[in-house]
Structures are given as structure tokens and as C-alpha cells.
Image: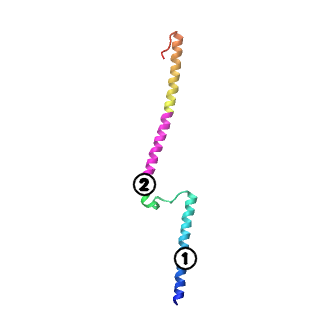
């Protein structure tokens, strides 16, 4: 084998490796585009895993706060309606008795 043939073979091997890497990169990009996710699992994020887990915990906590606030808001609205009804009944009682209701 001559030097020229060896360099040709070497070039072909480099080209094959380049094509393999490009194909792998293309598959990764295609998956990212189709799923909308940068990586398919947490281990692929490397050093950022702990930050991601912490952020997921913060998000979960805040979502719980929002659910609690929604529930409390519903309860407060119900209590307000009940108090308004009681106020209306009390005013009717005062009116029926001929007295003036307190403000």
C-alpha cells in the first residue's frame, strides 16, 4: 500500500466518522424538534440536573399555592354570599319590627 492509498483510506475513514456524527446530531435535533424538549431524560442534562430538580420542586410548590388560593377564594365568595343573605334577612327583621337597622 502506498502513502497515497493510506491517506485516501484515512480520509475515507474520517469522512465516514463525520457522516456518523452528523447523522447522530441530526437525529438528536429531530427528536428535540418533535418533542419540544432539549433532552429525553434528566441524565442528559449533566450538571444542571440538580437545578432542574430544584426548579421542578419550586414549580410544584407554587402550583400547590395557586390551587390553595383558588380553593380559599371560592370559600370566601361563598361566605360573602351567606353573609350578604344574613344581612338582608336582618334588615328585613329590623324593618318589620319598625326599628332602623344599624349601619
Coordinates of residue 89 in the picture (x, y in percent): 52, 18
Q: How many marks?
A: 2
The secondary structure making up most of the magenta span is: helix
**Is residue 60 covered in magenta?**
yes
Q: In the displayed structure, would residue 23 be above or below residue 14?
A: above
Q: Earlier in the sequence, mark 1 or mark 2?
A: 1
**Residue at image coords 52%, 90%:** 2
Residue at the top extreme of this rendering: 98
Q: Label 2's element?
A: helix
* Label number found at residue 16: 1
Q: In the displayed structure, would residue 49 be above or below residue 102?
A: below
**Residue at image coords 51%, 33%:** 74
Q: CA distance from mark 1 to mark 2?
A: 38 Å
Q: Label 1's element?
A: helix
Label 1 crowd (10 A; few <14 / some 14-19 / many >=20): few
Q: Which residue is mark 2?
A: 51
Query: What is the magenta range?
Result: 53-73
Coordinates of residue 12 in the picture (x, y in percent): 55, 80
Q: Nearer the viewer, residue 12 or 72?
A: 12
Q: In the displayed structure, would residue 70 be above or below residue 85?
A: below
Coordinates of residue 77 in the picture (x, y in percent): 51, 30
**Residue at image coords 52%, 86%:** 6
Label 2 crowd (10 A; few <14 / some 14-19 / many >=20): few
Q: Are marks 1 and 2 in contact (CB under 8 Å)?
A: no
Colour mode of the rendering: rainbow
* Label number found at residue 54: none
**Residue at image coords 48%, 41%:** 66
Q: In the displayed structure, would residue 28 be above or below residue 59?
A: below
Q: Nearer the viewer, residue 45 or 90?
A: 45
Residue at the bottom extreme of this rendering: 2
Amino acid at each position: 500500500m502506498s502513502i497515497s492509498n493510506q491517506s485516501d483510506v484515512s480520509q475515507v475513514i474520517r469522512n465516514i466518522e463525520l457522516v456518523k456524527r452528523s447523522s447522530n446530531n441530526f437525529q438528536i435535533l429531530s427528536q428535540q424538534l418533535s418533542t419540544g424538549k432539549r433532552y429525553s431524560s434528566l441524565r442528559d442534562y449533566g450538571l444542571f440536573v440538580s437545578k432542574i430538580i430544584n426548579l421542578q420542586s419550586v414549580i410544584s410548590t407554587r402550583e400547590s399555592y395557586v390551587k390553595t388560593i383558588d380553593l380559599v377564594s371560592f370559600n370566601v365568595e361563598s361566605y360573602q354570599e351567606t353573609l350578604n343573605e344574613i344581612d338582608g334577612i336582618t334588615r328585613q327583621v329590623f324593618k318589620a319590627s319598625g326599628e332602623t337597622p344599624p349601619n
